[in-house]
Amino acid sequence: MADFKDKPIKIAYLYEDLMNTYGDSGDVKVLRYLLAKEGYTVAVDNVSLGDPFDASHYDFVFFGGGQDFEQTVVAKDLLRHKATLANYIHAGHPMLGICGGYQLLGDYYKTASGTTIKGLGILPLHTVFKADSRMIGDTEFETKFGKVKAFENHSGRTYFDKPDELKPLGKMITGYGNNPEDGVEGLHYKNTIGSYAHGPLLRNINIAQAIAKLIVTRHQNRLSQTAVKN
Ligand code: GLN
């Protein structure tokens, strides 16, 4: 298959200007670095408030973390993109959502102030605030890509509504992950990963390399299809 190195790999960074807590944009930088080492150029589009967005034009979608206020603002705009993102995710194209971005893939996030932020509702999960603790600290968890070390800082507790349909990204060794009860971290559905891990997550090179590989495959498939159409 042609490698299409003459055409840039396209990354959509959803609300880059609003959703970037604790250096989550580092995830995109790590991927850019790994892909550049393979000889690819990478174009990153900040898809922000009011911008048009068609996920089928992209090889990777990134959605970083955000504070409750930013999530409220973003969520109002985000629902416009539900269909295109649902198609992209269910087709098995690569996406990573961190913390607030992960939460918004689900049905809703009930915040500390009692506001319910409506999420995309693409994956069967929801997130709720409980007053007794904020989940802060170093985390370590085991994934199918190997061990991951990161840190978390969130008040939302995420629960899977259809546990047979969704798999967690990992099993906790240290820290809370999705919530204090389940002992699991994040979500792995087809090639979409959701996680509470900051640090950024992709400083864990095992997981970064796996995602970079998926992006290259998606890039080649997307451009082969375009070539057939033309
Ligand atoms: N505001 C959300 C929470 O506290 C997400 C935080 C984040 O993205 N860092 O749960």
Image (cartoon, rainbow, N blue to C red):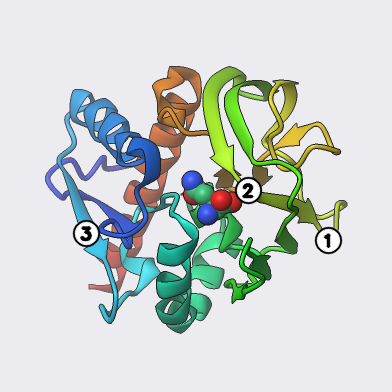
The tag on residue 155 is 2
Residue depicted at x 61% and y 67% = 113
Q: Decide which of 41, 50 is in the foreground and name it.
A: 50
Compare residues 75 and 43 and report the one nearer the observer.
75
Query: With respect to residue 92, does 169 lie above or below?
Result: above
The residue sitting at 73% across, 60% down in the picture is: 125
Q: Which residue is mark 3?
A: 45
> Could you say where residue 68 lies in the image, as x and y percent from the top left?
50, 61
Kind of residue at badge 3: Asp
**Mark earlier in primary sequence (2, 1):** 2
Q: Which residue is mark 1?
A: 161
Q: Residue at x 32, y 62 (%)?
A: 15
How much space separates mark 3 and mark 2, taking CA atoms? 29 Å
- Establish if 206 lies above or below 60: above
Q: CA distance from mark 2 to mark 1?
A: 19 Å
Q: Secondary structure at mark 2?
A: loop
